[in-house]
């Protein structure tokens, strides 16, 4: 999955698009229209992020638009219109429905089912214990093994997860949210590929590996500290940059920030502040921006405010290009091109009248496609009730297939480009997002801001404002505060419990392995952790010696410490 | 009047619990927000804080194992405070939770106003009780 971006800087052309005297005439015409149709105290509207929205937009609103500087052509800087020249005409976005529950065999079944239904990429979630580094038989895992994603405990589990699926034949996204477990899961993935005769340079895909997930977006009883999580995240990025040339070793998570309460502006702002920190850290480790940036990938949400989301993606692409070229001095055009996956919003979906979610998610998906996403998961309509059933995830996949095959929106690139509102909104999102990035940098950067609990507090603040909006009826939610109706009981997906099967497996695993070899490898890992070196090779050695995910992660907690996360008071 | 607010087990979602903490605070309670807790830690906090109400959140499915465990431990240690459970609780799970002794279940989409009403009723009952 290469960037596929046309090399060469592209052409530029200076100058306003509009003739000055025509513009003046249009301004007057619009002013007269306002006088005729808008009372001085007319209602004020905004986007979800609070950007004012005018009743109508016209040429004067984009008078400052410089086509070459601000839009460019698709596949060329500043990439506002798309990162590939012909986008979906040439190659559809990857259809990546999420899958993950129970044991590796349970999830393997769902993965193969989805591939048969037309999914073109895999997207795998991990259960709560695995995400936080506990084996399925740990006391901490007793309530949640197999819930929320697949349980992965030992190396063989990864082979089971991918049974019958060629690792060099499909793009795999591993939703390894937290760097503490991402490094272990990736090491197991690399070891499994090796065992299957697939060399690392043939592995294409992404691992999430985002320290904000570990330290701000989600909470846990024993989290790693931001510094430790960020360090492990960069260890995985560094290792993969050197050994897995087709792998995206990080996916900067905007989606979960939005789900936790962030506005579109904060989503972009946080993600960019984070990306800057990673690029700088990798530079410190001796990897130049041209080596690093082409492999960084992003993960955004698609939610209710349709045009705001489209503008968000376009603004993000332009911002990334500018930042990489102007601030970081990247020379390789692939370093300037922001590639992203989209998940349609889960939090926008309701438990009440859940079929209405089919409609919501379809609109969200359209925004992602009109915004030029490289990859898409459409949420299933039973999102608020539980994990998707086979029926509901298939319908979500069909939503993508209808968009691609029937709507014809893919016949041209960036069809909304040039629209007065969309271009103005793109500018507004960019300006506000830069301001937000500056506010993070003013705190000493994203890691420091996270350590202080500021990121978590910002998310909570936005979440609370939204909730009050819903409570007070200012934000409409059909079925919840408008058009409320009676609900029937729904079939909820029952996640198969993983603990009994995985516990037995773990018992046999521990019996069969060389306990001394495992201990030796873990001790060597501890040495690397204390010395500040890249932990990936030592993690790889440990998992190949038979250490379980829980055993490796426990070493992280014991050596790097457990963080007392600043929590929100009442 | 104190409220303990916690997330059960390894559940990563906190947005709902933070809303609950805020609502309870606005209803006049002193809120102690504990974040992720397993039952034994939550019970220890309850013994220490002597809350008027304990509100636990679960969106991971952890409620099925951990709420009955929590209720057993609380009763065994003599904690009388009503326990509220909120989150992704399917309707079919509610009877078992009530049988375990849970005072009220706030499933998906239940309005926050219901929680405010509950908290105010609780405060009123508490005032009557402590004035005797």
Image (tube, helix red, strand yellow):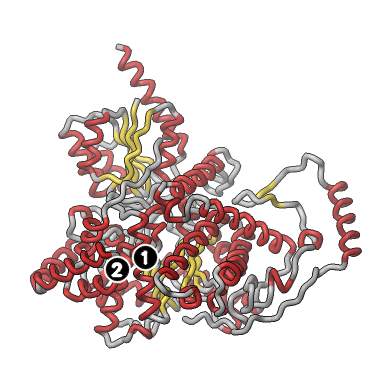
Q: Is residue B15 above or below residue A56?
A: above
Residue at the disc numbered 2: A533
Q: Chain of mark 1?
A: A
Q: How many marks?
A: 2
Q: Position of residue A88 (x, y in %)?
A: 58, 79
Which one is in front in this view, the residue at disc 2 or the one at disc 1?
2
Q: Chain of mark 2?
A: A
Distance from label 2 to label 1 (Cα)? 13 Å
Which labelled disc corresponds to residue A145?
Answer: none
Of the two numbered discs 2 and 1 on the same chain, state the one appearing first in sequence: 1
Quarter of the image for residue A429 reads bottom right
Residue at the disc numbered 1: A233
Pick whichever, A197 or A235, lies toward us.
A235
Pick whichever, B98 or A428, lies toward us.
A428
Q: Position of residue A257 (x, y in %)?
A: 47, 55
Dot 1: few (<14), some (14–19), or many (≥20) neighbours within 10 Å? Answer: many
Dot 2: few (<14), some (14–19), or many (≥20) neighbours within 10 Å? Answer: some
Q: Is residue A365 above or below residue A54?
A: below
Q: Position of residue A206 (x, y in %)?
A: 41, 73
């Amino acid at each position: 999955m290469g960037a596929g971006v046309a090399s060469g800087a592209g052409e530029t052309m200076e100058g306003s698009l509009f003739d000055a005297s025509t513009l003046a005439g249009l301004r007057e015409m619009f002013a007269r229209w306002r006088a005729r149709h808008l009372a001085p105290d007319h209602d004020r509207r905004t986007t979800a992020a609070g950007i004012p929205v005018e009743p109508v937009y016209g040429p004067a609103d984009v008078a400052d638009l410089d086509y070459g500087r601000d839009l460019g052509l698709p596949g060329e800087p500043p990439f506002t219109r798309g990162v590939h020249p012909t986008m979906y005409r040439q190659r559809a976005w990857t259809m990546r429905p999420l899958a993950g529950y129970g044991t590796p065999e349970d999830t393997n079944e769902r993965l193969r089912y989805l591939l048969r239904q037309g999914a073109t990429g895999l997207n795998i979630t991990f259960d709560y214990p695995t995400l936080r580094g506990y084996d399925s038989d740990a006391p901490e895992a007793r309530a949640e093994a197999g819930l929320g994603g697949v349980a992965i405990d030992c190396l063989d589990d990864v082979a089971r997860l991918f049974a019958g699926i060629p690792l060099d034949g499909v793009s795999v996204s591993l939703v390894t949210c937290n760097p503490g477990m991402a490094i272990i899961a990736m090491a197991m993935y690399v070891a499994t590929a090796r065992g299957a005769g697939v060399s690392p340079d043939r592995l294409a895909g992404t691992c999430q590996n985002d320290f904000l997930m570990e330290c701000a977006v989600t909470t846990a009883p024993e989290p790693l500290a931001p510094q430790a999580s960020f360090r492990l995240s960069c260890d995985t990025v560094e290792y993969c940059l050197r050994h897995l040339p087709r792998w995206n070793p990080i996916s900067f998570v905007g989606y979960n920030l939005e789900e936790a309460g962030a506005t579109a502006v904060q989503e972009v702002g946080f993600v960019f502040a984070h990306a800057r920190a990673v690029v700088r850290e990798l530079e410190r480790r001796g990897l130049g921006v041209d080596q690093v940036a082409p492999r960084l990938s992003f993960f955004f949400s698609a939610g209710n405010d349709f045009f705001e989301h489209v503008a968000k993606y376009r603004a993000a692409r332009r911002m990334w290009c500018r930042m990489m070229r102007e601030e970081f001095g990247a020379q390789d055009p692939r370093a300037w091109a922001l590639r992203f996956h989209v998940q349609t919003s889960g939090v926008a979906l309701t438990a009440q009248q859940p079929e209405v979610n089919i409609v919501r998610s379809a609109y969200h998906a359209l925004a992602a496609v009109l915004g030029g996403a490289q990859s898409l998961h459409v949420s299933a309509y039973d999102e608020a009730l539980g994990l998707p059933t086979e029926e509901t995830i298939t319908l979500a996949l069909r939503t993508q297939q209808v968009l691609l095959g029937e709507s014809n929106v893919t016949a041209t690139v960036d069809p909304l480009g040039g629209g007065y509102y969309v271009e103005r909104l793109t500018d507004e999102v960019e300006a506000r997002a830069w301001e937000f990035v500056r506010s993070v940098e003013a705190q000493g950067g994203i890691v420091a801001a996270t350590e202080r609990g500021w990121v978590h507090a910002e998310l909570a603040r936005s979440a609370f404002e939204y909730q009050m909006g819903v409570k007070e009826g200012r934000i409409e939610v059909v079925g919840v505060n408008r058009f409320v109706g009676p609900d029937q009981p729904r079939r909820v997906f029952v996640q198969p419990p993983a603990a009994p099967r995985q516990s037995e497996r773990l018992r046999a695993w521990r019996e069969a392995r060389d306990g001394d070899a495992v201990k030796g490898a873990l001790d060597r890992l501890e040495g690397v952790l204390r010395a500040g070196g890249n932990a990936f090779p030592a993690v790889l050695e440990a998992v190949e010696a038979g250490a379980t995910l829980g055993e490796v992660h426990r070493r992280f907690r014991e050596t790097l410490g457990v963080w007392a996360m600043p929590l929100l008071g009442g | 009047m104190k409220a303990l607010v916690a997330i059960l087990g390894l559940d990563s979602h906190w947005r709902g619990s933070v809303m609950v903490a805020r609502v309870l605070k606005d209803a006049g309670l002193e809120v102690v927000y504990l974040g992720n807790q397993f039952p034994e830690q939550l019970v220890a906090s309850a013994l220490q804080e002597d809350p008027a109400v304990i509100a636990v959140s679960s969106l991971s499915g952890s409620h099925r194992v951990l709420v009955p465990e929590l209720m057993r431990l609380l009763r065994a240690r003599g904690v009388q405070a009503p326990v509220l459970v909120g989150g992704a609780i399917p309707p079919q799970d509610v009877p078992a939770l009530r049988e375990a002794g849970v005072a009220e279940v706030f499933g998906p989409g239940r309005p926050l106003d219901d929680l405010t009403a509950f908290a105010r009723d609780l405060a009123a009952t508490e005032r009557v009780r402590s004035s005797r």
